[in-house]
Amino acid sequence: MSAQMNDQQPDEVNNTDNGMAPTCAVEGDVSTPVPLDSIRGALTQGASLAKHVWFKSGGAADWLFEPADLEDLKAFCESLDGNIPIMALGVGSNMIIRDGGVPGVVIKLGPQFAEVEVTGDTTLKAGAAAPANKVARRAAKAGIDGISFLTGIPGSVGGVTKMNGGCYGRETCDILVDCDVVLPDGQFVTLTNADLQYSYRHSVLPEGSVVVEARFKGFPGDPTVIKAEMDRISSERKGSQPIGSMTGGSTFKNPPGHSSWKLIDAAGLRGFKHGGAQVSEKHCNFLINTGGATSTEIEGLGEIVREKVYAHSGVQLEWEIKRVGRP
């Protein structure tokens, strides 16, 4: 697909799927026993998650596990024996952590899972903790085209793989070959593009699974031309999105035949505030923590927006941002 027309915002893609985004509110208890034997990574009880998400709000994880390596991750998940909920956390760029915190175990991969390697003329592999734009840069340097759109996604490889991240007319499903995943019971499996059954901002990756590596395929290109396209994408993002703000990226999916930001703007909600949360003046499909907002206020603002847009246009907006944890 070509670049967006002048009256469109850079986060838009044509889409037809209107499936509801999951709230991912899991059950659990802070006192749930977590096995400690043979763990080599860092395991922290009651770890604050606000610093790990872009909104800089929300409660704590019952447990936060940062594995030493792949074998440590597999052994840890196996030791949970399926009795404790697991949630993987990437860079937290498209997520609301609710104020009551996240039950069970949150798993965050470190820099040892962030390597990116060119593996062929048009292929490369990347650890799940690698920023998506790092993959785009390595691909461009190697003359691999078709992957430059990742420079416009402020997420991790694991995140875009799970949620079929995309912008500028392309999505992860267009480039993913397969990915390595640790299932909640510790099993290590490789899932193909087809296995994930991608749709708009969605995959069927089993709940509680942790993506550890993904492999991508593009097509031959001129590094100079690819870099120019990446520069264009970065420039458009800076010009149209609240870069540098405490935000969660695109808040709502684009309904079929509509652009969420246009519906929000038409409902008179540009700049609308609820507590410390605000609809961005720069891009209406972005919510902002203006400083000190609670996650309850941010999510509440989103619900107000949904209600007012429906009242104005009859269109039901659906969350793209992942909302997790206890209210």
Image (tube, rainbow, N blue to C red):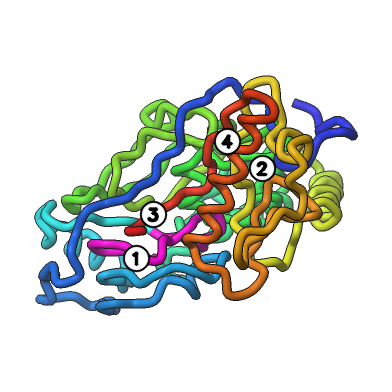
Q: Please provide the residue range marked out in magenta.
A: 89-108
Quarter of the image that includes the N terminus: top right
The tag on residue 317 is none
Distance from the alpha carbon under mark 3 to that under mark 4: 28 Å
The x and y percentages for residue 159 are 48, 50
What residue lies at 63% left-to-right and 21% top-to-bottom? Answer: 256
Q: Residue 315 occupies which quadrant of the picture? A: top right
Between disc 3 and disc 4, whose residue precedes? 4
Between disc 3 and disc 2, whose residue precedes? 2
Judged from the image, the secondary structure of the residue bearing numbered disc 3 is strand
Between disc 3 and disc 1, whose residue precedes? 1
- Under mark 3, the amino acid is Val
Label 4 vs label 1, nearer the camera: 1
Q: Is residue 28 above or below residue 256?
A: below
The tag on residue 100 is 1
Residue 17 visible in the snapshot: yes
Q: Is residue 201 magenta?
A: no
Q: Which residue is mark 4?
A: 175
- Under mark 4, the amino acid is Ile
Does the CB distance between marks 3 and 2 fall below 8 Å?
A: no
Label 3 vs label 1, nearer the camera: 1
Does the CB distance between marks 2 and 1 fall below 8 Å?
A: no
Distance from the alpha carbon under mark 3 to that under mark 2: 29 Å
- Under mark 2, the amino acid is Ile
The tag on residue 324 is 3
Which of the pair 185/33 is nearer the observer?
Answer: 33
Does the CB distance between marks 4 and 2 fall below 8 Å?
A: yes
Q: Residues within 10 Å of mark 1 (few under 14, many from 20)?
A: some
- Under mark 1, the amino acid is Gly
Judged from the image, the secondary structure of the residue bearing numbered disc 2 is loop
Distance from the alpha carbon under mark 2 to that under mark 1: 38 Å
The x and y percentages for residue 218 are 63, 37
